[in-house]
Each structure stands twice: as C-alpha cells, then as structure tokens.
Amino acid sequence: MSTALNQANQAVNRLRSEVKKDFYPEFHLTPPAGWMNDPNGLIYFNGLYHAFYQHHPFDENWGPMHWGHMTSPDLVHWQHQLIALAPDQDYDRDGCFSGCAVDDNGVLTLIYTGHRWLKEVGDDSAIQEVQCIATSEDGIYFTKHGPILQPPKDIMHFRDPKVWKQDERWYLVVGARDLHDTGQILLYSATDLRHWQFERILARASQKQGYMWECPDFFPLQDKFILMFSPQGIQAEGYQFRNQFQSGYLIGNWTPNNPFNVEHDFQELDAGHDFYAPQSFLAADGRRIIFGWMDMWESPMPSKADHWAGSFTLPRELSLGKQGNILIRPIRELTALRQNDIHIPPIQIISQHKTLDCPASSIELQVIFDLKQSTAERYGLELMASEDGKYATRLYIDNQAARLIFDRSQSGKAVTGYRSVPLNSHADSLHLHIFIDRSSVEIFINHGENCITSRIYPLGENHRVNLYAENGSACISSFQGWQL
Ligand code: FRU
C-alpha cells in the first residue's frame, strides 16, 4: 500500500473515535469519519456490491479527494473497507475525482478523473483533468496504471467518466465544459479500456441549461435510453431548479454510431434540497438502481462539528413511467431493515393536532391520505416533532395550491426552506412512503412519481410523529410504520 494510502487510512481511523453520533445515520452509507460526496464505482462484482465514494479522510471538509469504499452482500448491510485510491501520483495529485467501476474480463477496474490545480488550489480557471485507470486482484487493493484519456483541445473541465460494454465494445461518457461555458457530455468508444476514440458530443446545453454537466450516466431503461447528469448553472424557475446545482435526466433513443434522439426536456430526479451526482448500476437480477449524494454543495452541514459530513441516499430502483418520466422507488430489499411494527389505532378523520405514539428518528412510514374526503385547507404530518412543540419538519397537503409541501423551516439546526410537488388533480388518494434516518428525510410519492430528499438536523427531545389538520378535517385511509 502506498504511503499516501496508509496515511489516509490511519487518519480516518483516528478521526473515527471523535465522531459524535447525534445526527449520524443508522442505515445509510456514510463515511466512518471525514467528508463524503459523490457515489463512485457502483458495481455488483463476484457476488458482492461495491460502493466507492468521494472522500476526504483527514477532516470533515472537502479536500484532496480519495475513494472511500464499502461492500455489501445484499444492498442493505454494508461494511467499511480500506480506502481504495489516494491522490499520490503526478497526474492525480490534487484529487482522484469521480468515476466508475467495470468488470474487465473478471478484473475489477476503476476509471476515474485525475485532477490537478495548475495555479492555486480551488482556482477553477486553471485545472487539468485526465481519465485514469486502476485495477484490483482482490477487490480491496488497487494498482494504478495512469491516464488513458486526455481532454480534447480547449477543454479543461473534463471529468466523471462512466463506462459500459455494449455489443462487445466499450463506451465512455464524460462531463465537459467548453470554451463558451456550455455544459456537455462527450461520448468515446474503445475495444480495450486503454485506447479511446472520440465518437460525438452526445448532448449539450442549450441556453440556460448550465455551464458544466457533471457526473453523466447513460443507460438503457426498458426500450429507452436515459442520460442522467448533474448540471451546474441552471437558474431557479418557479418551483423547479431551486438547489445550488441540479440532477436529472433526458430520455430518448440511442444505438451505437447514432446520435441520441432526445424525446423530453430535462427533468429533475428529486424535488428535495439534498440530492446530487446520482450514479446507477445493475443489481444481480438486472434492476437498474441509483444512489445519490444526499447533500448539496454549499449547504450548511452541522454534522461537521461532529467530524463527519455526507451520506448516500437509499438505493432506488428506476423504471419507466407512462408520461416520458422515470419512476423512482426504494428497493424492495430495504424491508429487511424493519424491526418493530409501530402500532397506530385504525384511522381516522382528524380535525386538529394529534400526537401519535410513534417514535420518529429511524423509521419507515406508509401513509395514504384520502384527498376527496379531506376538507382541511392544510393537513399532513409533523415528522421529528419535539415534545415541547418547538421543532418539527412538516409534510403537508396545501389544498388551495394543490401541492404537497415539505417544510423544514422549523426542523432544528441550520437548514431552512420549502420544496414541493404538484398533486395529481385526478387522483383520489395520495400515497406517501417515508424514510427518516436521524438527519435525513426521503419521501417517495405515489409509488415513485416524485421524490423529495432533504437533510434536517433536529433539535429538542423525544421526537414523535404528529398528524394535523387546519380549518377542516383530514382523512387518513391507511397508516403503517416500522422502526428501523
Ligand atoms: C460532483 C463533483 C464531480 C467531481 C467531484 C469532486 O459533485 O464536483 O464533478 O468529480 O465532485 O469531488
């Protein structure tokens, strides 16, 4: 193991003993200590799931990027492994940036971006980015083999390769920013993983679609192709694009040697505050699953005071919806997390505030509201509500706006703000599938039509789930819950 890797592993082990667990997730992939951002190198290989991630093991802030590593037999129970990559070569000296993993004839192979600052650390106007390769014999220790793809002339921002094999040929998509600050995805192909040939610009931003497109992924979903990526530089517009950066997808048709024919405008994958840089992989049985980074650049992260920052979303299965959209559901394996049932009396019409005897900090809920029978102007749930009534995260239906609203303005520490999705005007009911894990809320709406993912940092004691209705009554036709 290189000296740099050794030092990184020692540093994270030291820091681990200082991590405070107040906001630390119970069942989400999270670094043992230090900083995490993007999911990298997600793969099912030799009977094991591998998840790598952008990692700074020396402290809780972003810094020279390493690749943290976790493995799992079942996508539910994860184990920390040794750090896989450290920035210890000239070509990746300032960071082993995001990338992917492939099975190259039985060899676990990582393809990632080697990053260098050419003037000052953090000066984005003078950088060098090249795609690099590393392989492993045992799935734990990796050997670097250097750069395999240089940027085209005039392109500096050139990162986050995603590679796949199709019809006996390798393909690679990579994010780029051209001289005019137009975000784009470039497509390459190769017969081995070392000699790449430029194919085409697969997609590029039109006006207002961003100056840089990060973390591309390109994959078939049923009879369509999906280009998933994370654009920087899109301005907020009405209810959409309200985060610092976005993550979403284009849907269309593609075959090798042909352009990507896009059928639908860019759509966001998640309406919450904290979702970025998702990457996909195939489960053992062929389902297309994604993990995202469950945070956002430049957001407050109070867990830094506890010496950690960042986690992944739950694994989510993708399928095609009927309206040129993607449906996103938590994977079915997650039912293995369920411990005790939360018993709630059969429900019920409520017309005021009601505290449920329901623990709140590590739970799964499935709640169905009857939209037609509910008359209240606003009604819904208070999640992680403190006993003294001071703090709560609200998820409610606003009848007049015809929207489902997530409100973290009184959640607790640091974070604020609202996010919302429209209610389907033809639907009689609203199905909410919610996972809370200490400092995160993930809400899957109507079996994957929408989702909302946000961080919260609850304050107060004895958190509970409450139901409430204002000016009228709310009808709940089903309420199920589990402690996780
Ligand atoms: C996305 C990103 C990538 C880059 C990595 C660096 O969040 O900016 O483009 O490879 O993070 O950590």
Image (tube, rainbow, N blue to C red):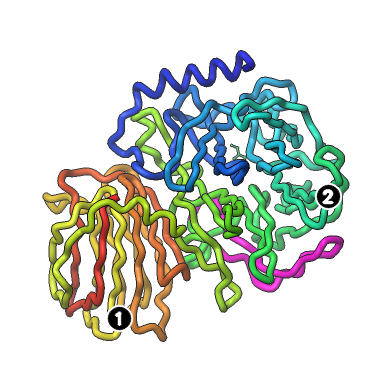
Residue at mark 2: 189
The image position of residue 231, as x and y in percent, is 62, 53
Mark closer to the chain start, 1 or 2: 2
The nearer-to-camera label among 1 and 2 is 2
Amino acid carrying label 1: it is Leu
The residue positioned farthest toward the top in the image shown: 3
Foreground residue, 145 or 474?
A: 145
Q: Quadrant of ligand 1?
A: top right
Q: CA distance from mark 1 to mark 2?
A: 51 Å
Residue at mark 1: 371
**Quadrant of the rendered image containing residue 378:** bottom left
When the figure is inspected, residue 25 is found, relative to residue 249, above or below; the finding is: above
User: Residue visible at 18% across and 44% down?
Assistant: 460
In the rendered image, which quarter contains the N terminus? Answer: top right
User: Residue visible at 59% across and 50% down?
Assistant: 279
User: Residue visible at 15% across and 46% down?
Assistant: 462
User: Residue visible at 25% across and 64% down?
Assistant: 381
The image position of residue 420, as x and y in percent, is 40, 66
**Quadrant of the rendered image containing residue 288:** bottom right
The boundaries of the magenta stretch are 243-267
The residue positioned farthest toward the front in the image shown: 47
The image position of residue 250, as x and y in percent, is 65, 65
Foreground residue, 239 or 278?
A: 278
Amino acid carrying label 2: it is Ser
Looking at the image, residue 419 sits to the left or right of residue 257; the answer is left
Secondary structure beneath disc 2?
strand
Magenta stretch encompasses residue 263: yes
